[in-house]
Amino acid sequence: MTDRNLPESPCLVIDLDRVRANYRALQAALPAARIRFAVKASPLPSIIRLLNDEGAEFDVASVGEIELCLAQGVDPAVMCYGNPIKKSAHIAAAYAAGVRRFAFDTEEDVERIAQHAPGSEVECRFLASAPASQTPFGAKFGCAPGEAVHLLVRARDLGLRIVGPYFHVGSQQLDPIAWQIGIEQAAAIAEALAVKDISVKAVNIGGGLPISYADPAPGVSELGAVIADAAARLLPEHTEIVVEPGRALVGNSGVIHAEVVNVRQAPDGRRWVYLDIGRYNGMAETENEYIAYRFQTDRDSDPRDEAVVAGPTCDGDDVLYQRTRVLLPTTLRAGDPIRILETGAYTASYSSVSFNGFPPLTVHVIGAERE
Ligand SMILES: Cc1ncc(COP(=O)(O)O)c(C=O)c1O
């Protein structure tokens, strides 16, 4: 798609062929693993249908995501309600829709699952001692590894079917050792459960698989080798691995086509470049400047210099980068097109409905949904 026939700026263009290639590359890197797409990264119907055709499972975080997947023909048997934060009514709705797999990290949650989704399969999320990722969860999710043993025993006693331990090393995790640490801790949980006559069927190693933005990230083959080695060395024989990527399947499939609205020399002595896209219409992951996206303009052969990059709203926090070193052409002018690369994950779905009157980011899909 050329800039000329694109709809009004800003818009996100998603290339389905890249999504398919990413899925197959991950499959090749982890041939024994079950791949569960984290829908939240890009809840686009065409992506869900494509991954469903490829044989993926789906990590759903809400009733809304369950309904979205059902509408695309996904069998609820391959969905897992992976969000540990959920109301009883949501568990009951998921169960009524046919979902039979749930993740949890507290005793209250597992009791609610037993009551509203009796006999379901469960994974217990623990907080792995992994190094911090680029967009860390902190301590928001996951019990202590020792508590996971107690909670899974409790789940068994409540009549639930035990799948095993589950961890997520934080999104955009750049250190492959993080998964090795998580698998070591999952292995210790599996060993403690064996003593209680519970055998672990699968370990869910979560998402977090990184992609290259302004800084390069390890690729799936490097990660796959670390994960496969740790799993083979540490986990009981026949333990399955479930991997739950969002970003790694869709991140590099998207490009945001945006426009420069203004360029000025501000009283702080810095050049400020204002775009028609900001924190509230797609660039949520620039919060704390966690994700450093790459920019591309038609003037990239001109000299470049540092710039502060800001969004279009009246909010003082709507500044994408003021600490990250962003180099943009010194000739950049209002009205210039600007492309923001690798923006296929966690962009459109984060867009506010109309903060400051700016509409949510529109999405346009190219490439083939079916081969
Ligand atoms: C439960 C769960 N699984 C998987 C993912 C996907 O993570 P990523 O996009 O880093 O692969 C997330 C992301 O927030 C998540 O919350």
Image: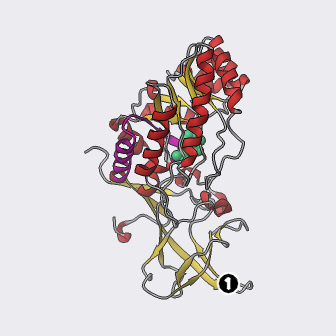
Q: Position of residue 84 (x, y in %)?
A: 65, 32
In this rendering, position of residue 281 left or right of residue 255: right
**Circle 1: element type:** loop
Please name the residue shown 29% across and 49% down the image.
368
| In the image, residue 20 lies in the stretch drawn in magenta | yes
Label 1 Cα crowd, 10 Å radius (few <14 / some 14-19 / many 20+): few
Q: Quadrant of the C terminus?
A: top left
Q: Quadrant of the N terminus?
A: bottom left
Residue 2, visible in the rendered structure: yes
- Furthest residue to the left? 371
Q: Position of residue 287 (x, y in %)?
A: 66, 60
In this rendering, position of residue 257 left or right of residue 64: left
- What amino acid does circle 1 point to? Arg
In this rendering, position of residue 323 left or right of residue 38: right
| In the image, residue 355 lies in the stretch drawn in magenta | no
Front-most of residues 59 and 144: 144
Q: Position of residue 352 (x, y in %)?
A: 62, 54
- Asked which quadrant contains residue 63, the reply is top right
Residue 61, visible in the rendered structure: no
The relative height of residue 129 versus residue 17 in the rendered view (above or below) is above
The region drawn magenta spans: 18-41
Q: Which residue is denoted by mark 1 in the rendering? A: 270
The relative height of residue 1 versus residue 125 in the rendered view (above or below) is below
Front-most of residues 122 and 191: 191
- Asked which quadrant contains residue 92, the reply is top right
The relative height of residue 174 versus residue 74 in the rendered view (above or below) is below
